[in-house]
Amino acid sequence: MTTKPAAAAARATVYGYPRQGRNRELKKAIEGYWKGRVTADALEATAAGLRGANWQQLAEAGVHEVPTGDFSYYDHVLDTTVMVGAIPERHRAAVGTDALDGYFAMARGTQDVAPLEMTKWFDTNYHYLVPELGPDTVFAADSSKQVAELKEALALGLSARPVLVGPVTYLLLAKPAPGVAAGFDPLTLLDRLLPVYAEVLADLRAAGAEWAQLDEPALVQDRTPAELDAAERAYDYLGALTDRPKLLVASYFDRLGDALPVLAKAPVEGLAVDFTEAAAANLDALAAVGGLPGKRLVAGVVNGRNIWVNDLEKSLAVLGTLLGLADRVDVAASCSLLHVPLDATAERDIAPQIVRWLAFARQKTDEIVTLANGLARGTGAIAAELSANRAHLASRAGSPITVDPAVRARTAAVTEADVRRSQPYAERTAAQRAHLGLPLLPTTTIGSFPQTTEVRTARSDLRAGRIDTAGYEERIKGEIREVISFQEKAGLDVLVHGEAERNDMVQYFAEQLTGYLATQHGWVQSYGTRYVRPPILAGDISRPAPMTVRWTTYAQSLTDRPVKGMLTGPVTMLAWSFVRDDQPLADTARQVALALRDEVNDLETAGTSVIQVDEPALRETLPLRTSDRPAYLGWATEAFRLTTGGARPATQIHTHMCYAEFGDIVEAIDDLDADVISLEAARSHMQVARELAAHGYPREAGPGVYDIHSPRVPSAEEATALLRTGLEALPAERLWVNPDCGLKTRGWPETRASLENLVAAARTIRGEL
């Protein structure tokens, strides 16, 4: 059957695009600027070149309207903080002296001034800088970045749409500034903020913007009547402005629910809706409100967060259903393409047949353009593309890569006994304390130590054939010896081997498990200049051989103190990969858990008494809607317990989480049944310790006292003060002392000084106790 052309020609667009460049040119330029090797002018020239190249590529692919303002040196929420003038008091002098250095100081901190708190952007692995607001916050418009980038695109002869974080989402993402009385709600500042947005919109209109996009992803979460009223008030105000571009209000990541009627009746000209994550719910809700007569609907039918090719015929069916619900239907990805790598054709180490299953940002752009053409001109106009797409989908579905009968049989045989330790915590902890003999307030690190130039060079030399495997392994042993020696001299109690052999905490394991594919160029921004290459989980998972035992055992041979075995947990292995979409996540998690369970058993057999199974993504992957959370937490915590359930009582199981809102999952943290948990706490001033205490968390915990995402060295006095705050919530016999996260991204000088101060703080508190 041939789809009829749309009444109004559909257009292709995107909400945002990867920032880094094909060879991570932005990362290199920014880090060069931090080190004084790149000037501010050279940095801006690199950034401008990348922006222009992105826009030209989009336009040449057939995108009718390119996004501007989504490009960022560090984070788009931090850019919004600058745009509305909400600079924290402690950073105002730096921003006033040099806007660029002040911007980076807010992101990274300085030796004397702490940065903004950082946490996850909804349920993604992207991190944003949390706005700090209070009743005395004074907003002031600064549209210079947004206007300049719009003018750059227009100067290239392109149709461009500025993209801004919407005012309601911005306030809902914010937290009370330090020192602000508990209970302050940043949303009470809405009426103060809206005139600033009005000024920015007027500036964009004057600069030539026909449309402006206001992103409101916070509205796909459960929202109170007061919050929905705030959204209605915000868009009544902005819609009533006469000096503004047309407004497109965008949502993504889930269903809009009660917020959809609010936005549908708002006096704005367009609405962008995600039809991938919650297609049926959003379709039904849109039909229930009578559609969007007289308005533009941008339909996000291409998944902007995963890397599998789109089912074009299925997406066309959705688009066809939407034609009668709006004045014009345009085609987009479900969200910004920031969350996927740039170009799948760069992957030379993946079989060409499998590459055809993949769609990175450039391929998704092509899919969007194809769908827009099909919607506008009928399916006959894209017959060749549809035929090729059907072949790619069939190839993947029928591939032996995707199914391993032995793995599926083992997964099906899991019993309740497999997901429980043999003794309850109260009995295990006595055995562990007797076995380990640790002091009060034991000190440790999260796992990784600095990945030095020498380590990275060794890995590069091995890949290039400049050294053989034996030569590489000698270099890694040298790094491990140095890490163990330093930890002993510094006085740490539970040591780690430093993970010198690991390229990434997920990729390292993925490369040793069946069912995973590793990319060479699949970089995705995690935060700032930190980019990761998420592996691709394409098939059933198993572990052919031990993955960590050799290096952990070698490290233990160098010391009498316990050395932790370090594993990445099953939920994080899923969340920080591009996971398969052809079976339930719970089934995939169980497969990964069984592979990791084998590793736990082998570590124990080799003499490892402390094993850490990191699950930083447990909170990140939490569904945005409360009603969806119990099912997720059920299989997620079960997968962790399946990983660790076979451990002996005297083996101390640790887990770790960082940079998320832990208060939402305290019960789930308890359900993991780990013996010790370490958590980020430095930037949030020990908030998590209070949350654990309020829950009555019965196990041991290490709220971090060293913010590793900043180059500053915390003093011993600062760490001592944080520990005292932690002791107000947790008893000393259950409190550990550790950094917020792994030290991979830090340099050795700051690492040495910070950990020495951390140990000194622990000794000070021990003396006081």
Image: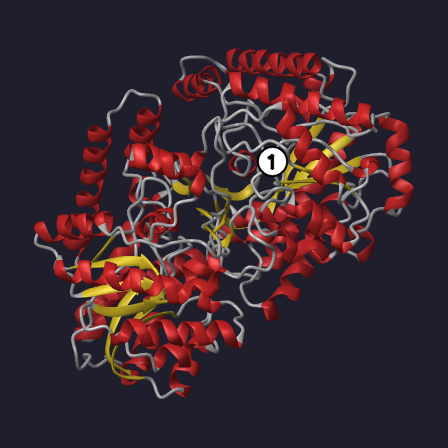
Give 220 or 428, whichever is nearer the viewer: 220
Residue at left 63%, top 39%?
543
Figure quadrant of residue 758? top right
Left or right for 215, reference 745: left
Q: Which residue is mark 1?
A: 740
Specify whether residue 453 is in view.
yes
Please determine whether, in this image, residue 378 is positioned above or below residue 581: below
Q: Position of residue 359 (x, y in %)?
A: 34, 52
Please determine whether, in this image, residue 603 is positioned above or below residue 301: above
Residue at left 62%, top 64%?
629
- Identity of the residue furthest to the front in this view: 136
Give 400 or 286, whichever is nearer the viewer: 286
Quarter the N terminus occupies: bottom left
Specify whether residue 253 is in view.
no
Residue at left 40%, top 61%?
394
Quarter the C terminus occupies: top right
